[in-house]
Amino acid sequence: MLSHYDAVIKSLSGDVNGVNKEFYTPTEYVAGTLRLVVNGKVYRPGDDTKGWTEIDSMTIELDEAPIAGDVLQAFYQDMETEHIGLANVKGSPFDPNEILP
């Protein structure tokens, strides 16, 4: 399950023209974590309204081409971001004396 602590939201690139169905994330994502955001509404793969398929770690193909003016974003776990746990945070409210290993 995708945790919002491990996720980013990024604009997708690709022509939004009523014809193009292929869109790209700016960074690689972990397979199965991507959610499509169209005009602020979140969609899962295979959704009846705005279905889409993962092509590779940076590409999705929509079932239906978005129309001019639609805003496409993706919410996903970014493979390029290092996600640190609280055990690695020193000098925080969780470890004010910096004594965690």
Image (cartoon, rainbow, N blue to C red):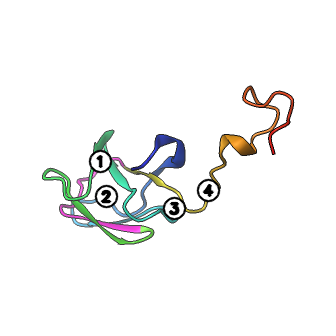
Residue beneath disc 2? 16
Kind of residue at disc 3: Pro
Where residue 86 sits: x, y (%)? 68, 40
Q: Earlier in the sequence, mark 1 or mark 2?
A: 2
Q: Which mark is residue 70?
A: 1
| Residue 62 rendering spot, x and y as whole percentages | 25, 63
Q: Are marks 1 and 2 in contact (CB under 8 Å)?
A: yes
Q: Is residue 6 magenta?
A: no
The residue pinned by badge 3 equals: 26
Taking 49 as reference, is 42 left or right? right
Q: Nearer the viewer, residue 89 or 12?
A: 89
Element assignment for label 4: loop
Residues in magenta, as a range: 59-72
Q: CA distance from mark 4 to mark 3?
A: 12 Å
Element type at mark 3 = loop
How many numbered marks are there?
Answer: 4
Q: Secondary structure at mark 1?
A: loop
